[in-house]
Amino acid sequence: MIRRGIWGFFVALLGLWALGCSSNQTIGDGGDGDDGTPNTDGPRLCANKDQCLQGEDCIDGVCKQVGTCSCNYDCDKARNEVCNRGNGKCEIGSPPTQCSSDCDCYTNETCSGTTCVPSGGDQQTCQQDSDCPDPAHQTCRDNRCVPKSCSTREDCAGATCLVCKNNECTAPPPVCQGINDCCVGFHCNFGTCLPDQTGCRSDSDCLRCGFATANQCSDQSACQNDNDCQDTAYPRCNTDTGACQPECISDIDCKLPGQKCVDTHCVTPGCTPASCAQGQWCDAGDGQCKAGCDENADCTPPDTCNYSTHQCGSTDCCGGACSPEQYCDTATCTCADSCVTSVGCMLVPCSTGTCDDTLKKCLVCPDTYVCHTDTGRCWCTAQTTCPNGMTCNTGTGQCEGGTTCNPPCQAGYNCVNGQCIPGGTGQDGDPCMSDADCSAGLLCNNSIFCIICMMFSADFNPDFACRYECSALGGGTCPVPDRKCTLARFFGSTGTLDARSMCQAPY
């Protein structure tokens, strides 16, 4: 306390001395230059603004340029000013609670550990480590608080996020270039420190991965009931296999009347993409049209639609945000987890429903088809062999034309493969709510569009009835004899993909 009083008295005397000097007095030789002009080689001491040059102010007893700064010590702490290093101006704000260098501190302060302390003041003297402002990262050496030395970031681990730089624990830089720029428990992901992922990615990591909770190991080998399945993507327990599975794969898996299967969950239908106006998207969760996008046509170029957020944004699809364990799904502009089984590929846009065991990625589009990222659909090309004598319109990516019926079919019948077959009124690409809305030979894809049953799977017997759908999740019972319930992927002439469990004719 005595030292602090003496220091305050000295500052007062210094101010009085400055009042008696010329406004051009500087720290240095204390006088004018050889030619009689004011000496401005050093900082000018002051007691008020009147003793400074035009455009300057008296800050902490020194004349400084008004509003210009490179560090906080160029600003006035008494006025709650902080240095905006982006525009080089002192602005009213809250002084930082932690520091990484002296630049974060004010005049007559220095950064010790993560705390700004008076340079040479009583608070920095000590008898033991506990006397220091930040004992976790400071040590008492020669009765002075100094930063603890470190060699790795683990040496700086604690309640405060610190890294080891120049053998001292300090705050991490705003942009990381590697793991050593992030504190313990974080990793560098394209310039940003993100929390480390814990848990598992597959059953090879433990007894059962994601059995109860996503990315977490379980000591159970099989589920007993739905209560054992805590992962929202796999909420149902298949007691036959002991594995947690999705609530649904197709509409038939939903038990309540009128429900449809959307993203492996049974929901009550409301809107459809076709029923929403341009600039809106259909939220299947509550059946409402909402402001946003569901295709690139809803956005102003060069922006595209981010299908995960349904908002228009930059053409930089994933923005470099994917971790090494992920890949950028250009159809949805999202970071997708590498697949483990083909079940995880069933709802991936343009996917064939197959997970490549080597690449750990969902394979997209059969041969001669290309994935159209604007719509997330497979488009035919000039090399595509279309069904029923149709040809590919490369402008729309659809197979068009084809075999006709002669004579033309009467009312209530539709031409399929050159034959008149009774059926509903919904044609390929028409909106629908269930298979009953579509013509014979067509399925209702995710309760949105009628599509042709055109299999590209070589191991699927083409002799099957489209209307004979079954629930592979519900035990696979078929409504007709001598057929087995088989999960299949269908591909319509409009480029639409669908995952279905169908009653397949035996070989």
Image (cartoon, grey):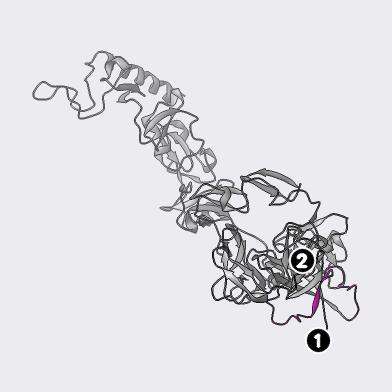
| Image side of residue 440 versus residue 29, left or right | right
- Reply above or below: 101 against 410: above
Q: Residues within 10 Å of mark 2 (few under 14, many from 20)?
A: many
Quarter of the picture holding the C terminus: bottom right
Question: Could you say which disc has been placed on residue 354 in the image?
Answer: none
Give SS at disc 2: strand
Which residue was labeled with disc 2? 443
For the record, the magenta segment spans 456-481
| Image side of residue 257 versus residue 404, left or right | right
Nearer-the-camera pick, 488 or 382: 382
Which residue was labeled with disc 1? 507
Rendering coords of residue 82 (x, y %): 43, 31
The CA span between labels 1 and 2 is: 23 Å
Q: Quadrant of residue 241?
A: bottom right
Residue furthest bottom in the image = 507
Q: Earlier in the sequence, mark 1 or mark 2?
A: 2
Nearer-the-camera pick, 204 or 110: 204
Is residue 496 something one can see in this rendering? yes
Instruction: Tell me what residue is drawn at x 68 percent, y 47 percent.
Output: 276
Rendering coords of residue 51 (x, y %): 27, 16
| Discs 1/2, front | 2
Give SS at disc 1: loop
- Amino acid type, mark 1: Tyr
- Reply above or below: 401 against 298: below
- Reply above or below: 469 against 78: below
- Reply above or below: 457 against 393: below
User: CB of mark 1 within 8 Å of CB of mark 2?
Assistant: no
Q: Quadrant of residue 328?
A: bottom right
- Amino acid type, mark 2: Leu
Rendering coords of residue 16 (x, y %): 30, 14
